[in-house]
């Protein structure tokens, strides 16, 4: 069993960070930051659209109530 794992040298088990890996790390981090910024901007935009939609619905219902108060229905 000792001969099976004899090829592993734990003293040499270090990761050398080369320029390629550093560039890949920087690119990956940049992509994640850009995705997060886009998500945040989209979320803010969705919240603004929802507020505008609710304001339009509220204004529409108020106009409908005003018109109904001016012209009462004949069914009453």
Image: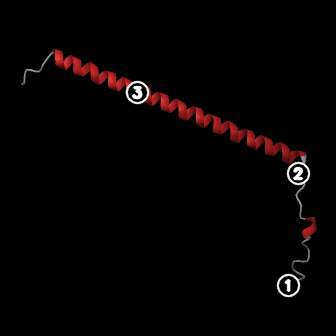
Q: Position of residue 31 (x, y in %)?
A: 71, 39
Image height of 47 relative to 2, above or below:
above
Q: Residue at x 59, y 37 (%)?
A: 39
The residue positioned farthest toward the bottom in the image shown: 1
- Residue depth check, mark 1 versus mark 2: number of the one nearer the observer: 2
Task: Report whether 22 appears left or right of 64.
Answer: right
The crowding category of the residue bearing disc 3, from other C-alpha atoms within 10 Å (few below 14, some 14 to 19, many at least 20), is few
The residue positioned farthest toward the top in the image shown: 70
Q: Position of residue 41 (x, y in %)?
A: 59, 32
Gap between marks 1 and 2 measured at Cα: 33 Å
Q: Which residue is mark 1?
A: 1
Q: Position of residue 57 (x, y in %)?
A: 34, 26
Q: Residue at x 78, y 41 (%)?
A: 27
Task: Report whether 32 appears left or right of 75.
Answer: right
Quarter occupied by the C terminus:
top left
Whether pointer 1 and pointer 2 mark residues with C-beta atoms closer than 8 Å, the reply is: no
Task: Report whether 52 appears left or right of 59.
Answer: right
Counting residues from the N terminus, which is met first, the one under dot 3 or under dot 1? 1
- Residue 55: mark: none
For label 2, the SS is loop
The crowding category of the residue bearing disc 2, from other C-alpha atoms within 10 Å (few below 14, some 14 to 19, many at least 20), is few
Whether pointer 3 and pointer 1 mark residues with C-beta atoms closer than 8 Å, the reply is: no
Counting residues from the N terminus, which is met first, the one under dot 1 or under dot 2? 1
Q: Residue at x 11, y 21 (%)?
A: 73
Gap between marks 2 and 3 measured at Cα: 52 Å
Q: Which residue is mark 2?
A: 17
Q: Which residue is mark 3?
A: 53
Gap between marks 3 and 1 measured at Cα: 71 Å
Q: Hey, which quadrant is residue 22 in on the image?
A: top right
């Amino acid at each position: 069993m000792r001969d099976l794992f004899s090829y592993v040298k734990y003293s040499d088990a270090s990761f050398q960070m080369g320029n390629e890996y550093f560039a890949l790390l920087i690119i990956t981090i940049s992509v994640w930051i850009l995705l997060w910024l886009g998500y945040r901007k989209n979320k803010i935009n969705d919240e603004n659209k929802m507020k505008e939609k609710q304001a339009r619905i509220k204004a529409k219902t108020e106009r409908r109530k005003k018109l109904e108060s001016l012209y009462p229905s004949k069914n009453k």
